[in-house]
Amino acid sequence: MKLTNIVEIKATLVLKTGLHIGAGDSEMHIGGIDNGVIKNPITQQPYIPGSSLKGKIRTLLEWRTGEVKKEPLSLAQAKTARDPESVKDILRLFGISGDTKNQDEEVTEIGVSRLAFWDCELSEDWKKQLEDENLSATEAKSENTIDRITSTAGNPRQTERVPAGTKFDFKLTLRQFENDKPELLDLTLKGLRLLELDSLGGSGSRGYGKVEFQNLTINGENKDISTIKPFE
């Protein structure tokens, strides 16, 4: 395979609602947050892991094919899929597992993964706004369970979120190899649009994690993905 180009997709990822991507805390502190968000260990500022973006976008694209399974799709599933080429395109973008018994010719057909997701740090202008206005980068959202018979609240807890309005620097690269189909870039953009229509992180069904890609560029050229129809 001959590498012919690397497409760079950049944007400002803006939170339209509060975002919670858990830090996996194993300790609970009296009077503290029950469920903290992941933070940069050096700056202690929240960020969005590239793995979270990759996993959610891949899942949405797999749901779109109608072939979603408990585990990420593999070459074995591509053989029995209703639309094998759609599954193979997802594998071309996100890669195939190296611990499965794939045939050499099948691996050669798919090649290496094309997409590389970067961790999203807070944008510089947002960090400056937080500093100038003496604001916190996160918020504590109090939640309760409601007894449906008595309407009384119980099990109070606090969930840490990154508040609506927060801006992150988003970057994604797409490696293009000789004979790659241009549709792979189109599929990538459909994945971004699906994420806008769905949610990122936890508790999406309760309104968390609605995001928008603003000022998106592809190799420096502006692209409005709000017009993309991901199901066509």
Image: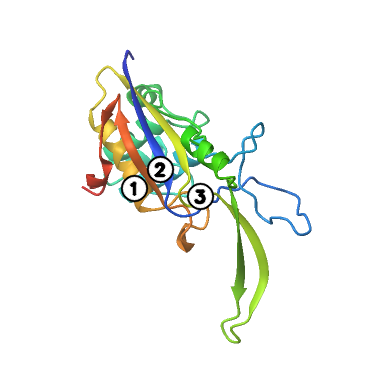
Residue 62 image-quadrant placement: top left
> Mark 2 or mark 3, which is nearer to you?
3
Of the numbered discs 1 and 3, the one sitting upstream in the chain is 1
4 relative to 71, above or below: above
Whether label 1 touches label 3, CB < 8 Å: no
**Residue 181, numbered circle:** none
79 is higher (above) or lower (below) than 145: above
| Disc marking residue 194 | 1
Under mark 3, the amino acid is Gly
Badge 1 marks a residue whose secondary structure is helix
In the rendered image, residue 21, in percent from the top left (x then y), is placed at 56, 47
The secondary structure type at the circle numbered 3 is: loop
Q: Amino acid at mark 2?
A: Ile
Marks 1/3: CA–CA distance: 14 Å
Compared with 129, 171 (above or below) is: above
The quadrant of the image that shows the N terminus is: top left
Q: CA distance from mark 2 to mark 3?
A: 11 Å
**In screen coordinates, is 215 left or right of 42?**
left
Q: Which residue shows up at 35% across the image and 36% down it?
A: 90
Q: How many marks?
A: 3
Label disc, if present, on residue 57 of the rendered structure: 2
> Badges 1 and 2: C-beta atoms under 8 Å apart?
yes
Q: Dot 3 corresponds to which residue?
A: 201
Furthest residue toward bottom: 150
Q: Alpha-carbon distance for marks 1 and 2?
A: 7 Å
Say if residue 62 shows up in the picture. Answer: no
Local secondary structure at mark 2:
helix
Quadrant of the rendered image containing residue 102:
top left
Earlier residue among tags 1 and 2 = 2
